[in-house]
Amino acid sequence: MCGIAGWYAPEARTRPADRNTLESMVEAIAHRGPDEFGLYLDPRVGLGHARLAIIDVVSGQQPMGDDRGASWLVFNGEIFNYVELREELIAAGHRFRTGSDTEVILQAWEAWGDRAFERFNGQFALALWDSANEALVLARDRLGVRPLYLCEHEGRLWFGSEVKAIFAADPSIPRALDPTGLAETFTFWSTVAPQSVFQGVTELEPGHLRILSPAGTIDRAYWTPRYPEGGAATFEGSLEDASREVRATLTDAVRLRMVRADVPVGSYLSGGLDSSLVAALGREAVGSAFATFSIRFEDAEFDETPFQRAMAERLGTDHHELMVRTSDIAAVFPRVVAHAERPLLRTAPAPLFLLSAAVHEAGFKVVLTGEGADEMFGGYDLFREGRVRRFWARQPDSAVRPRLLDRLYPYLARSPVASQAMAREFFGRDLAAADRPGFAHQTRWRPAAAIQRLFTPDLRAQVGALDVVDRLLCSLPVPFSRWSTLAQDQYLEIRTLMSGYLLSSQGDRMLMAHSVEGRFPYLDTRVVELANSLPPSYKLFGLDEKHVLKRVAAGLVPDEIIGRTKQPYRAPDAVSFLGDDAPDWVAHVLDPDSIRDAGVFDPVGVDRLWRKCRADARGAGLSNGDNMALVGVLSTGLLHEQFVRDDRPSTQPVHFLTVVDRLRDERRDGVTARIRQSQ
Amino acid sequence: MTSAVEDKVREFVIDYFYVTDARSLTNDQSLIDSDLVDSTGMMGIILFLETEFGITMADDETTPDNLDSIDRIVAYVERKRPSPPG
């Protein structure tokens, strides 16, 4: 796991960026790979690399060139099937100098060209310079586990694993928050690639490949999610068959992620089914001592300690617990935003930031997590809610059908009449649109979008002309309408919240903040393809979520965990910032001058919100919307302060071990030539 | 002409739901459909009405019919409140 950064000049007459520039870019993301640093420079391209050494620690340095020095690669991530691909390439006559997966990518490019990427089972973002064709190749894994940001500025393309690498390159690159990016964030909880929250900066879309050359730029998807069309499943076996197959595939996905590392691998344990199953299979794969890591909360509403301990005891792991208090969340939140590089509507990334610090301190570089199971196997309440609401929409006047919502949200049945009537009104909205794409998601998107009422009049006018939901729904793949409604909901969930938020703000960024690599067995290519091929009823059976996965877990995970009501991972939100002991930055960010300076929110509205929150220091009477609004305002203020207003790079110089500087060589050759001429 | 009740209710809704563009909030606008209020927000409105106007809302009165817009809230309060003296 690592960080990459660099630039490319499509035209030979563009002056190359110097070595210092490239070094600054790498230094800005040194946290991603503090073990070694390297760079490659020639008149057309600069490639920088910060390495977290995990596979072939001794000889896997980057940038790595091929035998002839014609192709150069910087790569962030892992190709888990590199051993198999290496054997295939050797059989085809290729010879290898190292045991690294990096070299496999180089040789795969040589052998298969742009068809190489669809063979990779991994999590990666990479930049490959093919000097013979004067082509820069950028590629990103199927689901966007690893990030890659791009910015075109004054004739060059700048790229980096994080936006801060791009901003460190050239002070003349504009820094401003983007209205569309803000509208998306305050709707979907995240921007949707290629959109970013910074003007002029885009994200390479997951599963995409971009080839830049003097002939022009090609950007294409080398992979897109597929689901059975027209109601027919491509998996023809029984539920039992599916369960057997999922277990075998998932077991191998976990095994690969355990054994394809030359350093020890631990596992996160949330207390839920997904990470428990991964940890159980991980323990099976190593067959020996195994470390697990868990977050605890003081507040029982968020805490899952008993389930985490039950699983750790069952597996006999070396279990590490981290108690996270509201004051810890407030203290680290500015650093969390600096790493997330986008506004956040939840504080949930903060405990994960603290957890990766604990993992790093315990001496681990790699952890498995259960992320992705809910998306691939239909685990979310949103999917169940969508099913109930669509069923209700068939008889909108039914009094009985909406009562099914009580089964999803048991608190409703115990709530006062006001809440029940409210819920009926809320969930019963737009029932006539039940067949339209995005129907299930509107109950999440609309409350988030309502926070836009806090935007300044200017920004409201700008985003008023945009309909980000419409824009997303207009970009759906052609077969979308032929997929089952569950598949449609899964697709939207994966494209918006999973790639943009869970794998990024709660995933890569929080892990890499402390140089820890997350590995995601549920996002293994084979697991994804298998899950997508299953009939919807194997995933969501009636209202039983992750139906097939529960069968897989039987016997591996305690029944109390398999049978428990799903508890979404959450952390204390607004309440973290309301106490008298709140850190000084809170008042500073909410100061009307700071709010005006950032230009995103209206100071009067923010003042009303803040007074409401302060009047309720325990946060008990604050709604979901109030919590999201306050966290959104605070994180946007921090983002503006750290990325827009403050343009001083906060980097430490590092030592570059691998240096291929052809600019210097050229200069030297030039001087030598002039000396010769003068003789 | 606006009533004192309407002024108070309107001011509360704007303040409590931090509406920045007050002109955009009409009195007949559904607070639920505008995503200003969810079930927790509804509790806040009920608490305000009970404290401010000295009324008690029965369970079966706490419905969107009575609470889902400024107009509906005002009408409910006017119905519920003892007639002013004189």
Image: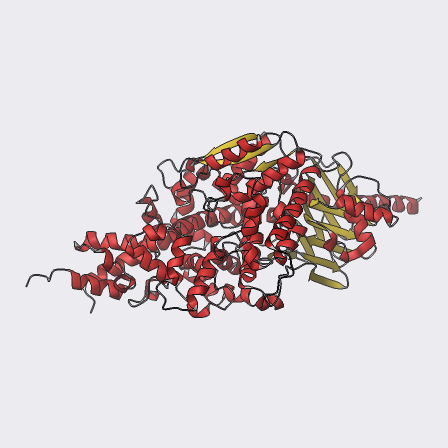
Give the percent coordinates (x, y) of residue A610.
35, 48
Give the percent coordinates (x, y) of residue A238.
61, 55
Residue A264's quadrant in the figure? top right
Name the residue nearer the viewer: A153 or A423: A423
Name the residue nearer the viewer: A287 or A262: A287
Quadrant location of the C terminus of chain A?
top right
Q: Outermost residue, left direction?
A: B86
Give the percent coordinates (x, y) of residue A206.
64, 55
Q: From where the camera sits, is residue A653 visible?
A: no
- Rendered view: A248 above or below A190: above
What is the count of numbered marks? 0
Q: Outermost residue, right direction?
A: A679
Residue A600's quadrant in the figure? bottom left
Name the residue nearer the viewer: A2 or A249: A249
Q: From where the camera sits, is residue A508 visible?
A: yes
Q: Is residue A305 left or right of residue A13?
A: left
Give the percent coordinates (x, y) of residue A462.
47, 64
Q: Is residue A207 left or right of residue A213?
A: left
